[in-house]
Image: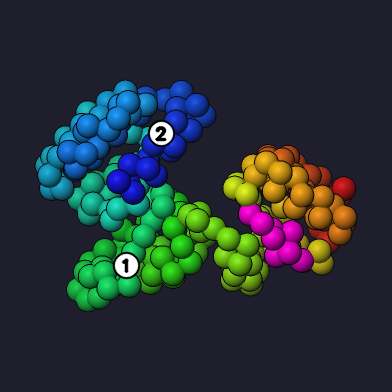
């Protein structure tokens, strides 16, 4: 059920953003009988995770992106996609504290696959920490699920030592979002949603002299102008 609930909005957003054909695979009969069907062009059971069947599937579909929803990666599918230069991502990624993936020999066997991921959105901070242990690179690891202001604060603190500027994107109603942003640090703030919570937190940030942008693109353009005129340490207004 969790995989389906994560995949459904992703299918809708990919369709709206790209207009590309989408193929969805599953391993559970509950997904086959999903109420209302799936907003995709093709939905069917995933073939056995063996090199031959996965090569045949990828040759037939010719995907530009492979996305896993919450569940573990399939080694043969992942390896074949990576070999073909197809980016692989995981949404709502979870790794249980007792997962066999965290221990030898499975961890060492899968390390190269996790290290090659193009994007991984972790469901929680503990999941993100365990995914990092599996080999996911810091630059592609994100905290996306069930986030709170404290989670944002922890991630910002962890990222500060690795990047010159941290872009903080709030996509859901995050109460206390304004409290995790330090006015004197190089942080770019973007609010994509949150209704009244977004408006209130935005007002608080503006009152402290912190600019807030409605889209990442707007924020990047403002940052580019600062860099162009040699003002990396100043705030955009």
User: In the picture shown, does residue 204 fall above or below 105?
Assistant: above
Q: Is residue 107 shown to the viewer in this render?
A: no
- Mark 2 highlights which residue? 11
Query: In this rendering, is residue 206 above or below 98?
Result: above
The location of residue 230, given as percent across then percent down, is 85, 54
Magenta-tinted stretch: 174-182
Q: CA distance from mark 1 to mark 2?
A: 25 Å
> Residue 201: x percent and y percent?
75, 52
Relative side of 209 to 151, left or right: right
Horizontally, is 39 left or right of 186 in the view? left
For the point 28% across and 56% down, the residue is 72
**Mark before the other along the chain sequence, 1 or 2:** 2
Q: Residue at x 22, y 54 (%)?
A: 75
Horizontally, is 232 left or right of 195 in the view? Answer: right
The percent coordinates of residue 37 (x first, y second) are 30, 27
Q: Residues within 10 Å of mark 2 (few under 14, many from 20)?
A: some
For the point 81% across and 55% down, the residue is 204
Q: Secondary structure at mark 1?
A: loop
**Relative to 146, is 126 above or below?**
below
Disc 1 target residue: 96
Q: How many marks?
A: 2
Residue positioned 69% across, 60% down in the render: 176
Q: Would you say residue 169 sits in the magenta stretch?
A: no
Residue 166 position by quadrant: bottom right
């Amino acid at each position: 059920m969790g995989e389906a609930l994560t995949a459904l909005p992703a299918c809708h957003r990919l369709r709206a953003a790209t207009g590309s054909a989408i193929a969805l695979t599953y391993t559970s009969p509950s997904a086959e009988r999903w109420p209302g069907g799936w907003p995709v062009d093709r939905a069917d059971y995933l073939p056995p995770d063996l090199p031959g069947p996965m090569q045949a599937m990828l040759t037939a579909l010719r995907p530009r992106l492979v996305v896993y929803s919450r569940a573990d990666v399939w080694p043969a599918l992942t390896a074949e996609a990576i070999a073909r230069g197809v980016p692989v991502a995981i949404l709502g990624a979870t790794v249980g504290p007792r997962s066999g993936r965290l221990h030898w020999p499975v961890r060492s066997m899968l390390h190269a696959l996790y290290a090659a991921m193009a994007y991984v959105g972790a469901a929680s901070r503990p999941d993100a920490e365990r995914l990092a242990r599996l080999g996911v690179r810091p630059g592609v690891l994100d905290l996306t699920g069930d986030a709170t202001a404290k989670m944002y604060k922890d991630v910002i603190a962890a990222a500060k030592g690795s990047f010159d500027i941290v872009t903080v994107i709030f996509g859901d109603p995050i109460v206390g979002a304004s409290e995790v942003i330090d006015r004197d640090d190089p942080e770019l703030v973007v609010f994509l949603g949150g209704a009244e919570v977004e408006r209130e937190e935005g007002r608080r940030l503006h009152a402290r002299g912190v600019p807030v942008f409605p889209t990442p693109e707007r924020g990047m353009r403002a940052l580019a102008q600062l860099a162009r005129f040699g003002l990396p340490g100043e705030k955009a207004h």
